[in-house]
Amino acid sequence: MIGKLRGVIEELDDDSLIIDVNGVGYHVFVSSRLLSNLSIGQTTALIIEMNVREDHIHLYGFPDVIERDWFRLLATVQGVGNKTGLAILAAYSPTQLVQAIMAKDIAAFKAISGIGPKLAERIVTELKDKVLKMPTSEFVVAAGKNKIPAAAQQSPASNDAISALVNLGYSRTEAYGAVLKASENAGGKPSIDVLIKLSLKELGRG
């Protein structure tokens, strides 16, 4: 099994590339977000997910193991194939995915080509608990020897503040992220009015 490739980029296509590794060219499917950061002649290393079937062997490349693990997680949702998984990773970084899923932002996934309302809802529903175990940095707080996601500490006031911001025209993901930061900055158990005020300040900085 191929787990990693390091070589020179020889060709770039709409959804894939050819990487030369010691004279052997490997055809690797990658996200458009990763493609935009690569150029022909560049030396790079890709973490590889190898998909073997009776009629083909496909290689999927990622900049690090975190995105590779997200690709695997997304594939556990029925209806999310390899192409859709790459499209999701092209649209959102792992940190943004945690935020969108915990915010139950179905619209964020419906905005991706090939994902309809039912699949978008399935992604959010089936992955909500699983993303708590995925590697993140921005949305994790220390708790003794363990680390628990700050998202898990949402209060009723936080939920009400998120709803209020959505009613003001912000997406659920934007509102969720702003309220999380506002909660951390406020400390204790801030009221909904305080949360909304601090959240609007956070959104104003974006």
Image: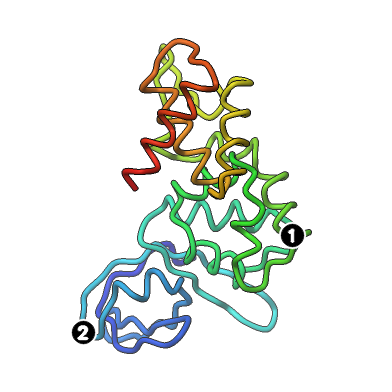
> x, y (%) of residue 49?
50, 64
Q: Is residue 205 above or below residue 92?
A: above
Q: Residues within 10 Å of mark 2 (few under 14, many from 20)?
A: few
Q: Is residue 116 above or below residue 7?
A: above
Taking depth in this image into account, of 149 and 194 the one nearest to the observer is 194
Q: Do the residues bearing badges 2 and 1 touch, measured as CB atoms within 8 Å?
A: no
Residue assigned mark 1: 119
Query: Exactly how many numbered labels are in the figure?
Result: 2
> x, y (%) of residue 36?
34, 75
Residue assigned mark 2: 41
> x, y (%) of residue 126?
71, 45
Amino acid type of the residue tagged 2 in the rendering? Gly
Taking depth in this image into account, of 26 and 125 the one nearest to the observer is 125
Q: Is residue 147 above or below residue 86?
A: above
Q: For the residue labelled by badge 1, is the local secondary structure a helix, a strand or a loop?
A: helix
Identify the residue shown where x is 64% and y is 56%. Answer: 107
- Image coloring type: rainbow
With 6 as the anchor, is 95 left or right in this view?
right
